Image (spheres, grey):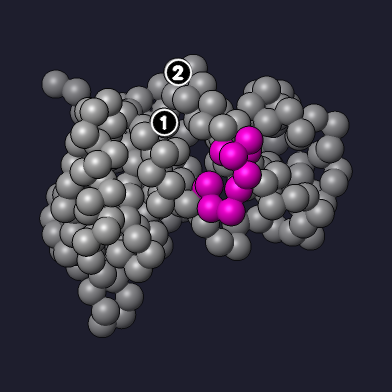
């Protein structure tokens, strides 16, 4: 029996009295990439925050590689080698590239090896460790956020709206990097997106979230996947 990398069962969560997620269930296999699609305000970021432990679960369970992490704080979930690449306020602009990458590790051990791997993913990082993160272009900052998450060589990574505002060339590089990471290390991924093309290019399966509920699930290889997704997003 294969233990899922991530399994949500009937999860309910939200902010104070506002319920956002309503009975969400999904499952991601080890090494699988799932895209979670939906319009703004449908609960996609809330779902990631609930998984990583930033938001309490009012009902349901969250398991990471068979470990029940439903009521764990974020730092304890991260120790299960779960990385989180948030959409907003993701970098420390006044810190160097090196310092931002270092935050992806629990100690200096393994930094040089991790940095070498990240320069293969994102060549712009080479020779720029001392540069302040806030001086990077928007696309470079997005790639640095992903690189920091990958530094810990996670078993599972949660990525929130990474393509927003990026040029097509940067999106192509990100897609290639994520696929390579999965192929090399078997990393499972849950990618929150509104970019349907990117989702279909990178992911194995998709889920569509609408008003806090999963309304469609399928394989991206299905010829009708794009039509199904777009029809759900338009309603």
Q: What numbered label is drawn on residue 172?
A: none
Q: Tell me where the magenta segment starts and ends, as one range.
A: 162-171
Visible residue check, residue 6: no
Q: What numbered label is drawn on residue 201?
A: 1
Query: Farthest top residue?
Result: 184
The image quadrant of residue 39 is bottom left
The image quadrant of residue 15 is bottom left
Task: Characterize the local packing of mark 1: few (<14), some (14-19) or many (20 or more) Cα atoms within 10 angstroms.
Answer: some
Task: Characterize the local packing of mark 2: few (<14), some (14-19) or many (20 or more) Cα atoms within 10 angstroms.
Answer: few
What main secondary structure does the magenta stretch of the protein show? loop
Kindly state the secondary structure of the residue where label 1 is placed: helix
Residue at position x 26%, y 46% in the image: 229
Residue picked out by circle 2: 183
User: Separation of disc 1 and disc 2 at Cα?
Assistant: 15 Å
Q: Is residue 45 above or below residue 7?
A: below
Q: Position of residue 180 (x, y in %)?
A: 51, 21
> 153 and 230: which one is in front?
230
Mark with earlier residue (1, 2): 2
Query: Farthest bottom residue?
Result: 17
Relative side of 147 to 84, left or right: right
Q: Position of residue 41 (x, y in %)?
A: 35, 68
Does the stretch in magenta take in 177? no
Does the stretch in magenta take in 163? yes
Q: Is residue 135 above or below residue 146?
A: below
Residue at position x 22%, y 61% in the image: 235
Residue at position x 46%, y 51% in the image: 160
Relative side of 156 to 211, left or right: right
Q: Position of residue 115 (x, y in %)?
A: 70, 29
Kindly state the secondary structure of the residue where label 2 is placed: helix
């Amino acid at each position: 029996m294969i233990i899922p990398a991530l399994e949500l069962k009937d999860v309910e969560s939200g902010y104070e009295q506002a319920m956002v997620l309503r009975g969400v269930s999904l499952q991601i296999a080890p090494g699988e990439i799932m895209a979670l699609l939906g319009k703004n305000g449908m609960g996609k970021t809330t779902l990631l925050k609930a998984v990583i432990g930033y938001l309490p679960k009012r009902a349901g369970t969250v398991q990471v590689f068979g470990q029940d992490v439903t009521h764990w704080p974020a730092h304890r979930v991260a120790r299960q080698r779960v990385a989180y690449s948030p959409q907003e306020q993701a970098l420390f602009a006044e810190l160097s590239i090196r310092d931002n990458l270092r935050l992806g590790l629990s100690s200096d051990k393994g930094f040089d090896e991790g940095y070498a791997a990240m320069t293969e993913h994102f060549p712009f990082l080479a020779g720029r460790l001392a540069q302040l993160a806030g001086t990077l272009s928007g696309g470079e900052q997005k790639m640095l956020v992903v690189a920091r998450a990958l530094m810990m060589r996670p078993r599972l990574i949660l990525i929130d709206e990474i393509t927003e505002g990026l040029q097509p060339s940067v999106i192509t590089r990100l897609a290639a990097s994520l696929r390579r990471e999965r192929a090399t290390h078997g990393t499972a991924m849950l990618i929150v997106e509104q970019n349907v093309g990117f989702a279909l290019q990178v992911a194995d399966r998709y889920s569509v979230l609408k008003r806090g509920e999963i309304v469609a699930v399928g394989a991206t290889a299905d010829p009708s996947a794009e039509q199904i997704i777009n029809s759900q997003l338009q309603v």
